[in-house]
Structures are given as C-alpha cells and as structure tokens.
Amino acid sequence: MSQVHPGVLPAAVREDFPLLLGADAPVYLDNAATTQKPRVVIDAVADYYRTANSNVGRGHHRLAMAATDRYERARATVARFLGARHADEVVFTANTTDSTNLVADVVGRRVVGRGDRVVVSGLEHNSNLLPWRRLCEQVGAELVVAPVDADGRVDLPAFAALMGPRVRLVAAAHVSNVLGTVNPVGEMTAEAHRHGALVLVDGAQAVAHLPVDVTELGADFYCFSGHKVYGPMGVGVLYGRRELLADLPPYRVGGGTVKGVSHHEPVRYVPAPARFEAGTPNVAGAVGLAAGLEYLLDLGMPAVRAHDESLVGAALEAVADLDDVVVVGDPGATPCGIVSLSVRGIHPYDVGGHLDAHGIAVRCGVHCASTFLDSLGLVGTVRLSFAVYNTLAEVDHVRSVLASARPGAWTAEHPTERFL
Ligand SMILES: Cc1ncc(COP(=O)(O)O)c(C=O)c1O
C-alpha cells in the first residue's frame, strides 16, 4: 500500500519498548497523549532506586551526594537538549501544566495588571489557556486570542496586528496537539519582544519531534513534559532565561527554597532553579527524563524527523483515496507526528471504538482543546500520533480498519463534555 519511504527508523527500535512487544501488543498511535518508555528509561529509574535513592540537595552523606549528582546531571542533560546556555535555566516541574501555571502565577501576577493584555493563540491546549484566563480574571486584564489560519497555524500578520503597548505576555504552543502543525514561534517571539512582551512557548508536542534550541528561539520561557518524550510521568521542565529567573519570587515555598529563615525577618531564598523546586523533587523522574532525551539524541533528531515525515506522509497517502476521510489542517507541511482526521457521517468516538476493536489505540475527541475544535466547527477528531517505534505496516493496518468504519453508538449530536 505505502510507497517507498526511505526515512523510516530501523524496525529494531521497537525492540527497545517492552510494552510494544508480544502478540497482543497494541498498534499504539496515542503518542501525543503519552509515549511508551524504552528499556533505557525504565532501567534508569529502577537503577536510581536500586543504587542511589536518597533526598537531594540536603543531606551530606554519600548516598545523598550520589542522588544530588544524578539529579543535577539530569538537569544538565535537559539544558544540553534544549540548547540552554546554563543548566540553572532548567527548572524541574511536575509537567507542562505545572510549568505554565508557575509562569502565570509568578511572572503573570508581576507583569500583567488591570487593563493589560495577554495574548494566546486560538489552538491552545487547556493547560496553556486556563492559567492565562485565570490570571486575566484575577488581575482585570484582557485575554486576547490570536487567530489561526486555514491550515492550522497562528496567522502571523493577524498576530502582529494584535501587538501593542498593553500586551505584556504571549503564550503559544510550538506544535498543535490537535493538528501537529507548527506555529511560527520564532517570528512571534521576535514580534512580541519588539513590543516589550514576554513569551512562553508550550513545547509539549514539539520536543519529541523537532530539534529545539531555546537560545536561538529567544523565547523567555519554554516548557514540556517528560512523559511525552519517552520519559516518565510526573516530571516536566520549565526553561527560563537566567536573567528572568534571577529576578522572580518563588512559586510554592517550603523546604529547599530558603537560604535563611526566621519567624519574623524577611526570608532569604536560594537562587533559581532550586527557588522554584519547593519540597522533595521527583528525582527518579528527572533521571528517567534525561535517559529519554539521551535515547532520542542517540537515534538522532534528523533520523527522527525523517521517520515522522515518512509516517505522516504514508498516513496522508493511505487515506487520500478513502472518500469519507477528511484530514484536518495541513500536517504534511512540517510533519510532527500527528494526523488528525474526521470520517464523514461517523462520530469520532465510533471511529475510535472501531479502531480499538482492531487493536489500534488513538485519541478521539477534543484533545483538551475544545475552544480550538469549536472554532473548527468539529465535535472532535480522530488523532493518529506517531512515535519512533511506529511502522509503515501499522499505517496500512489503520487504513484498512478506517475503510471499514461504520456509524455506531455515538451520533454527531452527542455532547463532547464527557471526553474533555
Ligand atoms: C500542547 C500541550 N500542552 C500542554 C499539555 C499538557 O501536558 P501535561 O498533561 O503533561 O501537563 C499537553 C498534553 O497533551 C499538550 O499537548
């Protein structure tokens, strides 16, 4: 079925992922929700607990030093992966959502005031929308939504037209979790900076697919989640420019954040990144995340890009002659491992159920981005999202199962709320 796609990674990559081996292994195409974990990540987490588990940054015994060393080495790996100039520009958080909330709370409340504006794009995930909505409600600012063009990217001229002296902050996804399209975040950042606004880029869907260089990008903040880039759940990253982090008050306060504390004198906080990591951090998570990033770097981002291109290209080809399948947006332009589609006359949940019955795991619905789906006039999409272990044979299987999809229990009138 598929043409020749020379960029596909070797089939042996799949052997690295225990959950995907064996006769009953799913065709796992829900990677935008979370990726499966390679053995090196599982082993790194287990090895940390077996050989180095202790609390970090506090104890002075050998084990505490070993744990601290692994934690800080993980931070250095993240900094290298992101092209950050300094490891202390990397704050470990719980996930992307935690990172956007941190910036909204700590930065937003400082720089955004009554009558100011915060600009988000029209395709944001709730995790990069709700913290800004709440901030605007709290301080009496206006949330402004930058329009998205017909292909599913922020419309740059329209975005530029929104900029002005009242815009204090811009928050936008690097890659859409619904369509896999890439926003022009470099140009948006430059434009926002011309007007003195700070910029946060949500890289949750980007880091597993694009080489990211935060220094080159120039954004003030960049965040992502470990679990979407072959690492564990419960650990995320907030990159922040050193000068900015140095100037900020803490987010949550508690152990690990203070240099000096008394009952009544002003508290002296430690510098970033520890200032933003109150309480015991997810050390094993950070170690596993670093192992996931190393795994990706070992495969090589050019090879990962070529793999994405091949699979997305093959998927688009495969559904092109299925009359009732409509691809949403333009995922082929800069493939980032996502193809979102609708099947005419069949509710996305029915399509998802049918695929699941044939061993194919996809996400259906609004993908935590109901405002974007509303703007597209869709009750949801069926999202195929690829990773390094997916194969062209899996794409062919999806095509034949899609071709046999029929309306089922759901109707187009069903509410979407159940699956937000
Ligand atoms: C673009 C985008 N931003 C933010 C998030 C939230 O990620 P997490 O749930 O790991 O915080 C997601 C998750 O799907 C996402 O796709």
Image (cartoon, grey):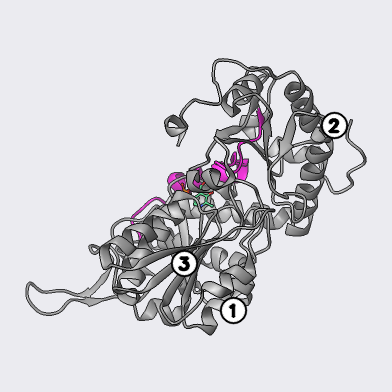
Which residue is most to the left? 264
For the residues carrying marks 1 and 3, which lies nearer the camera in this image? 3
- The residue at the point 51 percent across, 26 percent down is 413
Residue topped by disc 3: 119
Q: Quadrant of the N terminus?
A: top right
Three-letter amino acid code of the residue under disc 2: Asp
Mark sitting earlier along the chain (3/2): 3
Query: Which one is nearer the viewer's eye here, 386 or 261?
Result: 386
Left or right of 288, for residue 14: right
Q: Name above or below for residue 285 compared with residue 248.
A: above
Residue topped by disc 1: 190
Tally the numbered discs. Answer: 3
Mark sitting earlier along the chain (1/3): 3
C-alpha gap between disc 3 and disc 2? 39 Å
Residue 321, label in figure? 2
Q: Is mark 1 in CB contact (under 8 Å) with mark 3?
A: no
Q: Can residue 213 be seen?
A: no
What segment is highlighted magenta in the picture? Answer: 27-56
Q: Name above or below for residue 121 compared with residue 344.
A: below
Ligand 1 contact, mark 2 (Cβ < 8 Å) = no
- The residue at the point 69 percent across, 51 percent down is 336
Residue 308, label in figure? none
Ligand 1 contact, mark 3 (Cβ < 8 Å) = no
Left or right of 293, for residue 308: right
